[in-house]
Amino acid sequence: MKILTRICWMAFLLASLGAEGAIAQAPAGTVAGTVTLTAADGSTWAGDGARVALSCGADGTTTTEVADHNGAFRFLNVPPGGCSIDADQQGFLAERATVVVAGEQVVAIDLHLDVAPLRVGVNAGGTTPVPRRLTKRYQSGRRTGITFGSWCFGRSSPGTTR
């Protein structure tokens, strides 16, 4: 029994040392930068509150940060290799960039988000589609008004009941 206990402890210690050695072989880096917002007239300001997402590795693990009042963000303990960074903020076009992290390196990147174009929808046909429920009611000759749930607006036609 004592021999089995010693073997288990030795296996545990070797596994612990092996795990530390594997971690030491691949030191993590840092990705830091700023987000700048650009208006249509060319004026710029810090991307306060912009969402910045970092996706790394083959599995695509994603970490998200929010830029501070200066537009700055920082990701710590980034594994070595290629990563993609996505930045977005409401009212601005999103931007994607790619960085390569090597060792304990600090990768600096600045992201610029341009104001999104204003989109206005216009019904050029001049007609508004009528809900199917209303169309059927009027086609059957029972002009009882418009019904929304249990509410009815209008008058009943003679000879009809509700």
Image: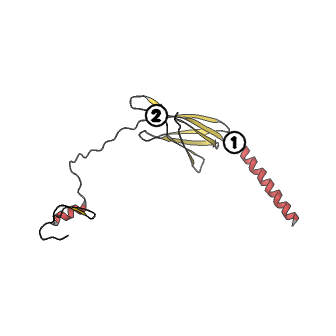
Q: Is residue 4 above or below residue 112?
A: below
Residue 104 in the image: x percent, y percent? 68, 38
Q: Secondary structure at mark 1?
A: loop
Residue 53 in the image: x percent, y percent? 53, 44
Residue bearing the label numbered 1:
27
The residue carrying pointer 2 sits among few (fewer than 14), some (14 to 19) or many (20 or more) residues within 10 Å by Cα, namely many
Q: Which mark is residue 37?
A: 2
Q: Secondary structure at mark 2?
A: strand
Q: Which mark is residue 69?
A: none
In front of the other: 145 or 73: 145
Q: Is residue 134 left or right of residue 61?
A: left
In front of the other: 2 or 125: 2
Question: Could you tell me the amino acid type at mark 2?
Answer: Leu
In front of the other: 68 or 153: 153
Q: Residue at 77% across / 51% down in the picture?
A: 18
Residue 145 in the image: x percent, y percent? 18, 62
Residue 45 in the image: x percent, y percent? 47, 31
Q: Residue at 85% across / 64% down in the picture?
A: 4
Question: Could you tell me the amino acid type at mark 1?
Answer: Pro
